[in-house]
Amino acid sequence: MRKFESSWDNGDFSFTKVFLTLLLVFGAFILGNLPLMLLYPSDRGQTMADLVAYFGFSSLFLLQMIPFILGLLGLVISAKYVHKTSPLTWFTSRNKIDINRIVFSFILWALLVIIPTLIDWLLFPTTYTVQSGFLPFLETFFLLAVCLPFQVLFEELLFRGFIFQGLAKRTKSALFAVIISGIMFGMMHIGNPEVRSEGFGLLGIYITLGVSISLMAWLDQGIEIAFGFHLANNFITGILVTSEDQAFQTHALLKMESLNLSFGSILILLLSILIFFVVCYKRFHWGSWFSLRNNH
């Protein structure tokens, strides 16, 4: 099996072609944001609550998904026609995508999110508000199930596929690629309303998640595990608990006034990530962590 971080050995990845891909992808992403910008009156409030009040949840969510879908299309076009390679090589080092890995990862992280959240709700019920209405919840469930795979696939192909592989190839260090691609993923969220509300501590959480997911991709030699983890994180949090300052407003089962970033919640998150790594390390027989120092 070829090395996941060595996929840039096949195809044309000259500086000009790499720059063209980044230009195409981010151009598509910006283009995808135009409908929301043009349809929303500039004289109205700019909070997420204002946007939801104007568009409604479903319309706003679909508008927010357009940039990710166009960005994903840009990545696929770049892989095939700019770099002359298969998009599959940006997803996995295997001959085909391992669906079992995606399912296992999704279920494992879903449980590691659901269980602590429900325990916290039972211990501190006043922190949460139970949202009523089965049909709005069903609408949320359906929209997230259909749309989130495109959003997550775009981010994983970009950060764990294209960028991680490129950094590993240029620097000859998978460890450097893991850290930098993870930091870049976290910094992508710097403009999110929840970061502005909760402060840079939450940005640190995003960076931690980014580095963790990049590490998963390297250890497993593909982004199946990373994709399942990322999809479960976005989907389960979307249907389970929401807050007024989140980028994606959903009709989840529970609602908080804010994300309530505390030492306890950070500790639980880090412990959950550790459990996830240990289980996957044993389940998939990952190699030595210390070989991250180089690609050889």
Image (cartoon, rainbow, N blue to C red):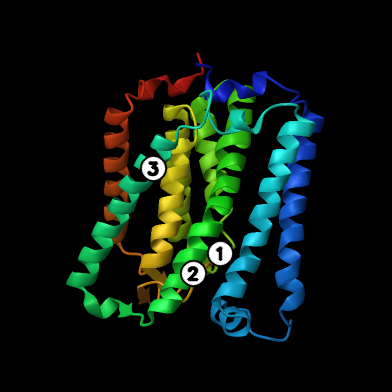
Mark 1, secondary structure of its residue? loop
Judge by depth and name the residue closer to the eye, 169 or 147: 147
> What residue is at 36 percent from the left and 80 percent from the top?
131
Give the CA distance from mark 2 to mark 1: 7 Å
Identity of the residue furthest to the left in this view: 123
**C-alpha gap between disc 3 and disc 1:** 28 Å
Write down the residue under mark 1. 192
Is 138 on the left or on the right of 160, as rendered? Answer: left
Q: Where is residue 134 in the image (x, y as percent from the top left)?
A: 38, 78
Image marks 2 and 1: residues in contact by CB distance under 8 Å: yes
Task: For residue 264, say whether it is visible.
Answer: no
Residue holding disc 2: 246
Q: Residues within 10 Å of mark 3 (few under 14, many from 20)?
A: some
Foreground residue, 272 or 32?
Answer: 32
Residue 69 can be seen, yes or no: yes
Residue 117: which numbered mark, if any? none
Q: Position of residue 191 (x, y in %)?
A: 59, 63
